[in-house]
Amino acid sequence: MLVLTKKVGESVVIDGGIEGFVLENNGHQVRLGFNAPEEIVVVRSELLARQNTEQPRRP
């Protein structure tokens, strides 16, 4: 795991095509923004976890 300290307005580039920005820090929350190629899916981890635990619906 790579741990970084970044300030608002700074960014990190991952694999040359995904860029993550620190947009805002209000002390309790940090707002992040991501630019990625269209073929890369970016999903919040809590939505991915929920998606993995839901049972498939039957028609």
Image (tube, rainbow, N blue to C red):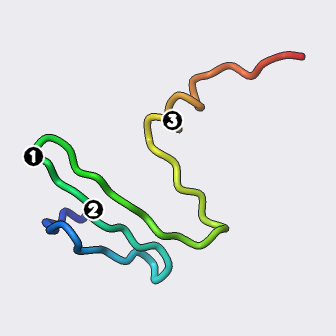
Crowd around label 2: few <14 · some 14–19 · many ≥20 (10 Å): some
- For label 1, the SS is loop
> In the drawing, what numbered circle is on residue 27?
1
For marks 3 and 2, give the CA distance: 21 Å
Residue in view at x 66 percent, y 67 percent? 39
Q: Amino acid at mark 3?
A: Leu
56, 9: nearer the viewer: 9
Nearest to N terminus: mark 3 or mark 2:
2
Residue at the limit of the structure toward the bottom, as seen here: 16
Left or right, residue 27 beside residue 33: left
Amino acid at dot 2: Leu
Residue 34 placed where, x, y %? 43, 64
Between circles 3 and 1, the one closer to the viewer is: 1
Count of marks overlaid on the render:
3
Q: What residue is shown with label 2?
A: 23
Q: CA distance from mark 1 to mark 2?
A: 13 Å
Residue at 23% over, 72% down: 9
